[in-house]
Amino acid sequence: MNEAIQELLGRFGEAVQEWTQVTPNEVRFTVSSVVWREVAQYLRDAPLWQMDYPADLTVWDTGNEFWLYLRLWSSVYNHNVILFTAISREEPRIASLATLYPGVDWHEREMYDMYGVIFEGHPNLKRILLPDDWEGFPFRKDYVAVPSGDPLRGPQPVD
Amino acid sequence: MEILSQGMVINVGPQHPSTHGVLRLILTLDGEQIVACEPVIGYLHRGLEKMMERRPYRHNIPFTDRLDYLAALSNNLAICQCIERLGGVEVPERAQYIRVLLMELQRIASHLVFLGTFGTDLGATTMFLYAFREREMVLDLLEECTGARLTYNWVRVGGVPDDLPEGFGEKVLDFVKVFRQRMDEYDRLLTRNRIFRSRTQGIGVLPKEMALAYGCSGPMARASGIAYDIRKVAPYEVYDRVEFDVPVLEDGDVWARYLVRMEEMRQSLRIIEQVLRDMPDGAVQTKLPKVFKPPAGIAYSRVESPRGELSFMMVSDGSSNPVRVHIRAPSFVNLSVLPRLLEGAKVADLVAILGSIDVVLGEIDR
């Protein structure tokens, strides 16, 4: 795995802000959001990585920025890679990975649904769990909900 | 002369016996063939992940019972493992054995629900009665141990709440003996049934590349030739100390997914016997402080639930509540491949294909 890590670091240089090898077959990278898609594509296609299985993708809100978490697995090497990146809360935009990994399609829709993160290039970015006419993004830390009185519409955000 | 036909749109669910919960499918048909399928989910959405952010770590365990309600123990284990990794909590050896024992009983119970409902979906109603007769035996065992029949809430951070009841091992071994014979009955009733085979073989084929790219897990992936079983690729608890095989088939059709689950039940029996044989004496729980504050950081856990890779991811900032809890539900990911499986399939096969994915809407909608 060391050789693969060195190749990735050499290729993306400054864009990799931080990395740690947690176990012999798991490594975590924090990358700049600009290269998010390039790193994912490289990890999928590079012969030393072959991270062909999109295991998980999610977002969390620190209050200052949104963090993305992408977990990949390689069916060839049994390696795990976790990618992190931070994006701005005011304008949460990031390149979509749905065309690279069809498996993250629904995860990205869910994250759009809950956090309002715009995945650019996603083929079908619309709400998935909440009703289409829902207002606001309920998983954001500053979302305040009040009961709407309508059981079919659920709580609504306060202006 | 060419007859042009516009696709007919047909709505299935959300209230429909074959959708196994509140799942709605919008199908576009061309004659008998399905052209497009759009699953509509979210009818059971309760915002559990957000609710968990508002509560101390350990108060969240009962919520997980309501995710995959057919395999509540797997969910309990997944959240506890995640919290344990976050806080660096050790689990006593006996507790690990008890966990594995209960997980495998749970797997059998869950696969029996699949077997029964899948048989009913295809018109083999007798299978339902057989499968639920045996599931009742497992539920009785689990009830004796945990006090509940579905929402067990039994795993704790740092172990399990209590030791096994007196004479539990013998009762489980009795069940294993009976169940081995019953499995042969199932084979005679269903596996060697020609009608059943012709309704499942070559239907809903999921190629290996597609299964990988979509992140399918569990029996879905293993029926398509991917040897992805968390118990083997990243062993947890004491799965590295027991011997068992992971059934992997290449065909990727409904039939293969059925066979994988049947074989998994047999393997679970093997695991149960070994665990009961090797289980050491000792404590079942690590003492933890009343107010539990794991250090700041990120942790995730992976568990092979009956449906596939169940993963919890938690972010901690050092306080008593998590900043973020994310649940990677296997059914959610497995269902996302359904539109691809249904392209070009016959309407009559919809029920077989959907049944073979074995979704639980409680964990899809969360």
Image (tube, coloured by chain):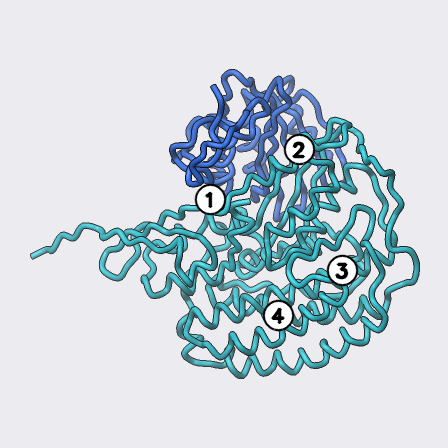
Chain colours: A blue, B cyan
* Foreground tag (2 vs 4): 2
Residue that badge 1 annotates: B42
Residue that badge 2 annotates: B54
Q: Is B291 located above or below residue B149 in the figure?
A: above
Residue that badge 4 annotates: B263
Q: Do badges 1 and 3 share one subunit?
A: yes
Q: Do badges 2 and 4 share one subunit?
A: yes
Instruction: Please name whichever residue, B300 or B19, is drawn nearer the observer in this view of the structure.
Output: B19
Q: Is B161 located above or below residue A101 in the figure?
A: below
Identify the secondary structure beneath mark 1. loop
Give whichever of discs 2 and 3 has the lower sequence position: 2
* Foreground tag (3 vs 4): 3
Inter-mark Cα distance, 4 to 1: 32 Å
Give whichever of discs 2 and 4 has the lower sequence position: 2
* Foreground tag (2 vs 1): 2
Q: Position of residue B330 (x, y in %)?
A: 57, 50
Residue occupying the point 83% across, 47% down: B158
Name the image quarter holding the N terminus of chain B.
bottom left
Residue that badge 3 annotates: B100
Indicate which disc residue B203 carries: none
Drawn side of residue B104 relative to residue B358, left or right? right
Kindly identify the amino acid type of the residue bearing the numbered disc 1. Answer: Gly
Kindly identify the amino acid type of the residue bearing the numbered disc 4. Answer: Glu
Residue B147, quarter of picture:
bottom right
Q: Do badges 4 and 1 share one subunit?
A: yes
Inter-mark Cα distance, 3 to 4: 18 Å
Can the viewer see residue B277 in this picture?
yes
Inter-mark Cα distance, 2 to 1: 22 Å
Drawn side of residue B261 relative to residue B19, left or right? right
Residue B134, quarter of picture:
bottom right
